[in-house]
Amino acid sequence: MAYRAKKKRRFPDWIVYGLALAIFIWTAYGVEEDVIIPEPPTSPELGPLLPSESPLDEIILVDAAPAQSGTGTAFAINEEGLWLTARHVVDSCETVGLRVGLGRFIPVEYQVIQNSDLAVLQSKWTRRALPADLDSARQIGEIGYFFGYPQGEPGEVVGSLIARNRMKVRGRYTNDEAILAWSELGRSRGLFGSLGGMSGAPVLDKDGEIIGVVSAEAPRRGRIYSVAPRYLRGIITEPGDGVEPLSLETYGQSADRLRRDRRVAKVICLVD
């Protein structure tokens, strides 16, 4: 009696390739617990500014509106899962998460820093820290680079330092702190209007080192305001590495690399 050999069942190639890709992504990002969360709309503005007489006013007034779902930017400050963003992005949020992939976010805990528009995020998601220079004196006219997610999309802006001001916040919470004022010089191609979603982004100097955190804007005047470097001392304590010097010709490519490596990431806030 003859026996016919059974053919081995073969999975379609697309299933094999799909599994391999999933394993690669999981290994590369090292995320233990991520969830799919509907992404909220981008905040329409970067912490709306109240009218003032001059873009060089010594005191900038900011109205902190009631908490609402929205997006911002965060960046890694050590290799143990600590990230930094702007306080007004996450303050009073029910759920805060960092984007780790398409539609995927990892929930994080946050702690606001009193007397400054800063908040520290704690996650299980680790990335290399960005380098910082918080002790050098900043010079009027120097160039700053802002990398993040304006309007919820990858984008970057470059500005020139024009003044040292104070920012007074009223509304949802109150605050009074020193800030740096920047005049916008350029931005990503195709990026128009408000920079909502850039809040919490790192401000980098020509050496690619952190010198502040994006806090607010005056869209009509083309002004951006950042947390002064002294407020970051004691929060950013690791040296960081791996960011090359920046220039007006190549800063867009540098921004893309930091976002691709997820050292600069989108942060979301959900309010019930």
Image: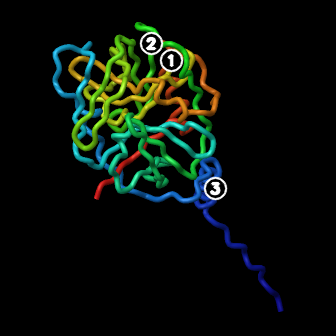
Numbered disc in front, either 1 or 3: 1
Calculate the distance from the C-alpha at mark 1 to the C-alpha at mark 3: 37 Å
Of residues 127 and 120, which is closer to you in this image?
120
Q: Secondary structure at mark 3?
A: helix
Question: Mark 1 is on which residue type?
Answer: Asp
At label 1, counting other C-alpha atoms closer than 10 Å, the crowd grade (few under 14, some 14-19, many 20 or more) is many
Label 2: which residue? 143
Relative to 126, 249 lies left or right? left
Query: In which quadrant will I find the N terminus?
Result: bottom right
At label 2, counting other C-alpha atoms closer than 10 Å, the crowd grade (few under 14, some 14-19, many 20 or more) is many
Q: Secondary structure at mark 2?
A: strand
Residue found at the far bottom of this picture:
1
Calculate the distance from the C-alpha at mark 2 to the C-alpha at mark 3: 41 Å
At label 3, counting other C-alpha atoms closer than 10 Å, the crowd grade (few under 14, some 14-19, many 20 or more) is few
Determine whether 20 is above or below 258 in the image.
Answer: below
Question: Mark 2 is on which residue type?
Answer: Ile
For marks 2 and 1 on the same chain, the one whose residue lies earlier in the sequence: 2
Identify the image quadrant of residue 160.
Answer: top left
Relative to 45, 24 lies left or right? right
Calculate the distance from the C-alpha at mark 2 to the C-alpha at mark 1: 6 Å
Residue 22: image x %, image y %? Answer: 59, 55
Determine whether 94 is above or below 248 in the image.
Answer: below
For marks 2 and 3 on the same chain, the one whose residue lies earlier in the sequence: 3
Give the residue drawn at x 16%, y 24%. 51
Q: Dots 2 and 1: beta carbons under 8 Å? A: yes
Identify the disc placed on residue 23. Answer: 3
